[in-house]
Image (cartoon, grey):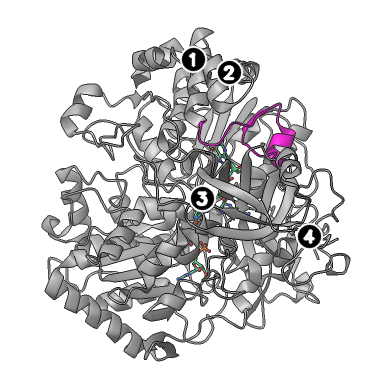
Amino acid sequence: MPSRDPIAEPWGTRTPYGPGDPWPARVDLHLAEGVEPDQVDRWVRSASLLHSNGDAMDIAVKDGRIVGVRGRAEDRVNRGRLDPKDLYGWQAGHSPDRLTRPLVRRGGELVETDWDTAMDLVVERSRGLLDERGPSALGFYTSGQLFLEEYHTLAALCHGAIGTNHLDGNTRLCTATAAAALKESFGCDGQPGSYADIDHADVIALYGHNMAETQAVLWTRVLDRLAGPNPPRLLCVDPRPTPVAREAALHLAPRPGTNVALMNAILHELIRTDRVDHAYVEAHTVGYGELVRLTADYPPERAAEICDLPAQGIREAAALLGGAERLLSTVLQGFYQSNQATAAAVQVNNVHLLRGMLGRPGAGVLQMNGQPTAENTRECGADGDMTGFRNWNNDRHVADLAAAWNLDPARIPHYAPPTHAMQIMRYAEKGSIRFLWVSATNPAVSLPELRRIREVLAHRDLFLVVQDVFMTETAELADVVLPAATWGEKTGTFTNSDRTVHLSEKAVEPPGQARPDLDIFLDYARRMGFRDRDGRPFPQWHDPASAFEAWKRAGAGRPCDYSGLTYDLLRDAGGIQWPCDADRPEGTERLYADGRFWASPEECESYGRDLVTGAPLEEAEYRAANPGGLAMIKAAEYVAPHEEPSGEYPFTLITGRTLYHFHTRTKTARAPELQRAAPEVWVEVSASDAREAGIAEGDPVEVRSARGAVVARARVSGIRPGVLFVPFHYGYWDTGAPDAGGAGGRAANELSATDWDPVSKQPLYKTAAARLRALGPGDGRPSPAPTTTASAPVGAEVARTRGEPDTRETYPGGGTR
Ligand SMILES: Nc1nc2c(c(=O)[nH]1)N[C@H]1C(S)=C(S)[C@@H](COP(=O)(O)OP(=O)(O)OC[C@H]3O[C@@H](n4cnc5c(=O)[nH]c(N)nc54)[C@H](O)[C@@H]3O)O[C@H]1N2
Ligand SMILES: Nc1nc2c(c(=O)[nH]1)N[C@H]1C(S)=C(S)[C@@H](COP(=O)(O)OP(=O)(O)OC[C@H]3O[C@@H](n4cnc5c(=O)[nH]c(N)nc54)[C@H](O)[C@@H]3O)O[C@H]1N2
Ligand SMILES: [Mo]
């Protein structure tokens, strides 16, 4: 019973405020039909697990079941607000098709079994491979959606106990570039800015970030500033007319994959017009001279040609950024998953270094996260980095970590960079990895080039363990399926994009025999008989609270210092930003306020890479370039995408999200309000391209790349001409297998290429070449794309996306008229 229809009005009503004022509270609530607030038995503290924003909420429990959620007015992140996924997504937990018992493959079929049988099988295969082939035969692929305690445990198991280098998270697909860009500029991962910078900024620049749809509550904060006195001006860089673009003072819609050229021209203009804080640059940075030299070759006219933008627009963007007194920038997948991902994201950092816009209210950069707990995957080292933002290339860091775990340093692999997810898949394909344990991610839908990924995962030489809450496309291919408890059914902590840590407490029992992921990992460790240096069972912890204490020891003294936090403090105070230690008991709003960075050769997390080739730098090179541990201004030449539109494939294909769904929809498709709002896949086509191809709104079309094809209804939208957009949410669990005859599936990743950024190794989901073919006239129905979002129709009458079921007819595989 929300007071509004959150589907039709995802951002709700305005609570305007002015610069420097506190963001007013607005409490959003949704309870199951027929339940009144005073009938709720208990409210249990948590935060949202369906994006990286960290919206704080209480879970309503009645008769041992979750019956709704309410935003927490006191919390610094959302001041009570919740978005549509927050309000409705919890219903997935009740779904009758939850996994409730372990499954093992027998005679080709997955059959139910008990935990002992399933775990014995996993342990037997692990031991056998360790004895025969060594630790490198084992790979682990995890998530950005578990809890901190679970990642730290998994990292300790893989890097410490087993000694394999093959551990990565789906954060590789998500925010590996954020981490890489922060390491390149500041020597270490760690988000400099704070969400509160929105309260103070006079200019906010969003680069490849559709905040309105992907961090909808943060966007309400921006909308509330826009509605108040002295509003900020927005710059939006996105090839689609997103809701962000609609509110922007300036919208640049570049050709996808040209971000570096655009940024170089902006930097060129900032330097030419001397919008440079020379005192800051001199005191706190190295590399300015090289940036001046390189960007001299990028006048706006040159970038205008590469990006296909008006040169005047680029000059105006530079003037907007150059005139800002308090500049906030946010960066997300339009940069991270596009051509030259890290090089482009680093240029945003450069704008801030040049202008001295760091570490004070309103002046900040947010190299955003995507997943709710991606930050923790990174800080715990479950993404292949070394636990606590340590440098795998620095023997002292390895020794330090070994001491925290009470293990011999020689057990921790540090002979080579950790293996990234795309390389793990390659090793599985080649047969050197024989055992792959996938937890809380669905690679059979989310990795690029699905036909190949399905083959790799289904190969009979690969023993595949899948730990999930549902029977996903990936679980279908497994040898062992482990049923997990999820949000609301287990306790743990997680950290959002601006370093705010929340505690999420168990509200209800998991269904059937499903168990918390932490219990599963610890059970595996006990059965494997791992020991520490003193012969005690390893890991030495046994439940969420003891796992949190162990993490505090492993992260203490590093930037992500949690040593001042306790579950009780998080319970009392709500969200707190790390670092939080004895000196900073209330946490830390902004990093680098003192102009000091974690960049000295002794402290840094990485010696850096060449931004164009990705070649790693040696310690000696790093020492020579940055002996004083200053921030690093790193310049990069523009290099064209590997796959550019050409005769056979004349369109650029980009993929991404819509407001109402989360990823492969395992949760959001099981929430009726969300599923109804975007029930099927679609393809966005510009009006001019549609006209030329004879395609009208809702007509069936085929999009084909060199990898495969997708069949969907066309949405004629305001997207940049020459560009197609396909949302990547739609796999096959609810419709059956992809068409084997090659007639086309519906998952966007049938189309994407096996290619990644040379620095961050993040796959390039946002630059591929494709062709578009009309499949005959439609039946007059529009495409199922929402009307409230970047996918809004142009030139056709389409019923507005609304929440009330009665006003929106639903039917299989289509939209609404
Ligand atoms: N509703 C919803 N919210 C989510 C999620 C979800 O699945 N659904 N997922 C969460 C996760 S894990 C993530 S990572 C975030 C992602 O959040 P976002 O990055 O905001 O989402 P995307 O739709 O992937 O991409 C953002 C924009 O990049 C633009 N783009 C594509 N190519 C280029 C390019 O070359 N240059 C530029 N400048 N822009 C380009 C697209 O048009 C798109 O609008 O969202 C989080 N929040
Ligand atoms: N084409 C294209 N592809 C993309 C992207 C894109 O923009 N375009 N974006 C990429 C990005 S940024 C991301 S983050 C990935 C996301 O890709 P995935 O991680 O594959 O997507 P999810 O559907 O979130 O998968 C999470 C899985 O974990 C399960 N799960 C949820 N909670 C729990 C739990 O508590 N325990 C366990 N064990 N399991 C749980 C869910 O049921 C689900 O199956 O996709 C990437 N792929
Ligand atoms: Mo992501």
Whether pointer 4 and pointer 2 mark residues with C-beta atoms closer than 8 Å, the reply is no
SS for callout 2: helix
Label 1 vs label 4: CA separation? Answer: 49 Å
Label 4 CB sits under 8 Å from any ligand 1 atom:
no
Foreground mark, 4 or 2, reads 4
SS for callout 3: loop
At label 3, counting other C-alpha atoms closer than 10 Å, the crowd grade (few under 14, some 14-19, many 20 or more) is many
Q: In this orientation, which residue lies closer to the viewer: 144 or 33?
A: 144
Foreground mark, 2 or 3, reads 2
Q: Which mark is residue 268?
A: 1
Residue 339 is inside the magenta segment: no
Whether pointer 1 and pointer 2 mark residues with C-beta atoms closer than 8 Å, the reply is yes
Residue 247 is inside the magenta segment: yes
Residue 508 in sight: yes
Residue 210 in sight: no
Q: Earlier in the sequence, mark 1 or mark 2?
A: 1
Q: Which residues are magenta?
A: 234-258
Q: Which mark is residue 496?
A: 3
* Residue drawn at x 27%, y 45% as measured from the top left: 390
